[in-house]
Amino acid sequence: MRGRRHLGFVAAAATLLAAAPLSTIYDRWTWLVECAVVVGMVAGTATLVRWWRGPVWAQGLGMLVALLLGLTWIFPSGEEFLALLPTPGTITHFGSLVAASGEDMRSYGVPVQDIDSLLFLTAFGVGTVAIVVDLLTVGLRRPALAGLPMLAIYSVPVAVHVDSVSAVPFVIGAVGFLWLLAADNVDRVRHFGRRFTGDGRDVDVWEPSPLAAAGRRLAVIGVAVAVLLPLAVPGMTSGLLSQLNASGSGDGNGPAGLGGSPGRINLFAQLSGELNRSEVRDMVRVTTEDPEPFYLRFAVADEFRRQGFVPRTPNGEQVTAPLPDPRRLNRASQGITRTAHQASVEVLDFVMPFLPVYAEPVATRGMDGNWRYDPTMQVVYSNRASSKGRKYSFDYVRSEYSPQALAAAESLPEGHSLRTLYTRVEPSADVEALVARLTEDKRNDYERVRAIYDYFSRENGFSYQLSTEGGTSGQDIVNFLTNKAGFCQQYAAAMTWLVRQAGIPARVAFGFTNGNNRRENTYTLTNLNLHAWTEVYFADIGWVPFDPTPAANVPGSLRSDYAPDPDRPDLPSPTTDTSAGPAADPSAGPETSAGPEEAFDGTSADGGGVVQDSGPSWPMYVLGVAVLLALLLSVPALRRVLLRRRRQVRVAAAAGTLATVAGNGDATPGVARVVLSDSELARARADAHAAWDELVDTLVDFRIRVDPAETPRTTADRLVREELSAGPAGEAVRLLGRAEERARYAREPLRHGPLVDALRSVRRELSAGADRRTRIMAATLPPSVLFRWRSAIMDMSAGFVGLSGRLRDRMLRWSPRRILASRPSR
């Protein structure tokens, strides 16, 4: 019975592991804490009932009561008896939570915040699954069937997510299920008694049998295949093979390279990575009879979260259905012109679940039913296909606006859905103060937007840089507004934030500028033409683009009458149908070699001409690397010099001290009399050891054999015979040997003679007798230091191996086979 109680706790833990996929639904971990409380109460109640030898029906009833009490404690209605026992009001409260959960599931997208109705539904569902798993595993002894309710938990995020769920939570749940099966198997074997091998050897109960080990291997292989096969087969998930194969056709479910689900792509990271590439890749080729088309769009980031602006999951009808035509909508037409155009696109090396189109397409050709159009986001997307290799054409409407038309647009009312959705930002006192200052005394939304748009100018200190600096504010928007240096994504996100702070709907759009590689009506767009800008919503007009990035740094930048270049106020404001701004200068030519979004004159954005002088800066980098390498190589030599100096200073300082405690001088020269105190005695021995250690290191540096089995006197005699002469160097090494020998074995150490001078004499003699290579190595890379470092690394490695072994032994103690083996069978 004790084994079954333990099996119940394993079933509870396996249920919690099976609930791991729910982490993809919630933004926080509150659901896990509440589920752990409910499952713990259910498992504890089942254990108590089994301890009293209750039947299976009593176990189930007790777990239902525990589930009810747990839900009452976590989700109280305020009408409970003694704050814990449920009342009819509690049941009514539970019913209202279940009813509200349906509406909340339709209103909120994943990941959701902590909402009581959804948390109650999760805790109730996981608790119910825990009851079923416990009854199947412990009560009916059918643990394999327990996988069905555990699999039901995994089906919830699969049904909620538009795209595929990560395989990691499934692996965690599968590990829990395998643990449950293994625990049940060991519990069954334990009841058979002791096992023996064919040769009569006693087998420990927890030791796996070959058949059980084979079964576990097959189970692990089955889980691995279940996880990896859907990732590899196109059409089942996002497609691991298509992600690894950057040169694939992109016809499968998951795109390669930059691909992914439309609602889960980090557009800012993709844009930053492409603009910082060293090579230039042709991505899209577009042909249009529009003389000066605007930017080619493919996505928008219109939802604000803690990490910034992210794309919502688009929602729309198939692109083959009739698309909305802005010319048929009841909008103010005064000052607004709309012209129809056609375009053909060939995607070369652009892998996304989006198709690049111009804003406001009205008809498409060459797109199949896998592609859909979201009229709110104005994007063509797919949950199953990739853009790479696609060829298609479409009709679109080009809208142009006058400043007077935008100024006449009314502000959206406070409770309007668009204003509520597209004005959400994180509170920031610095941003609020800046927006209040910029929009002060502005009469309408257009004037407020223009004030914010004009703020991003060179006059206000803004400059274009592909590398951005961090800050201390904790908010990227405040850091950018403080440093005032960044590239298109920082400018677009910052303006969107400021416009939203002013109470005007705004979002970030992503696409391609026209660039300079143009032949007749065909543009070849590269990764350097990727761009981000801001779109602002005006009532009865729609989404109007504003590009706050400095025009001089954006090849193919477009400016218009309602949004002229703030860095060139003295020039006439060009309209979008007559000029493409400074970047459309024909003198630039299609073969211009300017970098990504770089000024065409080769100068920096502030006109300082720094780019021309930055070419020969590579010698400084080479010099810096050489200095750094020299410093690294000098570390061993510096370590050896410091160690030698520390030993010599210690020995020299001790010489004077011992001389004062010496006797009347009746001893032989170089031999000290009895040290008067224990401290002086210990110091004398330590100094002799330091001198001998320095001698040994010197021998190692000059590659002279050192035998640890020899006594100091034997070593000194051998050095005199083989390496040193019988002159001063020989006497010096014998003095060092006698001092070390007395320090090791004698009761009294020798008087501290001229050990420092003896060390110097021996070192000079050894250096004179060594070859040039040995002397250089002894001075720059002393072998004694390198040997100590190598020994230290080996000791650390051995210690780490021992620690990992002890940790493994401790973890094996928690193996279900060991735990069950220690329990007596019944």
Image (spheres, rainbow, N blue to C red):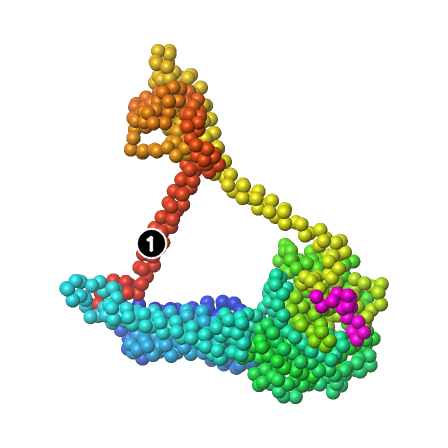
Q: Nearer the viewer, residue 590 or 126?
A: 590
Query: What span is in magenta?
Result: 576-591
- Helix, strand or loop at label 1? It is helix
In this rendering, would 613 be left or right of 319?
right
Assign the magenta stretch its main secondary structure. Answer: loop
In this rendering, would 710 be left or right of 616?
left
Q: State which quadrant residue 586 falls in.
A: bottom right
Q: Is residue 660 magenta?
A: no
Q: Residue at x 39, y 74 (%)?
A: 225
In this rendering, would 124 be left or right of 607?
left
| Up/down of 261 relative to 268, above or below | below
| Up/down of 135 relative to 271, above or below | below
* Image location of residue 737, percent across then percent down: 34, 25
* Image location of residue 73, percent across then percent down: 46, 71
Q: Can the viewer see residue 166 in this picture?
A: yes
Q: Can the viewer see residue 131 in this picture?
A: no
Q: Nearer the viewer, residue 803 or 801?
A: 801
Q: State which quadrant residue 544 falls in.
A: bottom right
Residue hosting label 1: 805
Q: Residue at x 71, y 68 (%)?
A: 590
Category of crowding for the residue at label 1, using alpha-carbon neighbours closer than 10 angstroms: few (below 14), some (14–19), many (at least 20): few
Quadrant location of the N terminus?
bottom left
Q: Residue at x 23, y 70 (%)?
A: 189
* Residue type pointed to by label 1: Gly
Q: Nearer the viewer, residue 410 or 390?
A: 390
Q: Residue at x 63, y 77 (%)?
A: 346
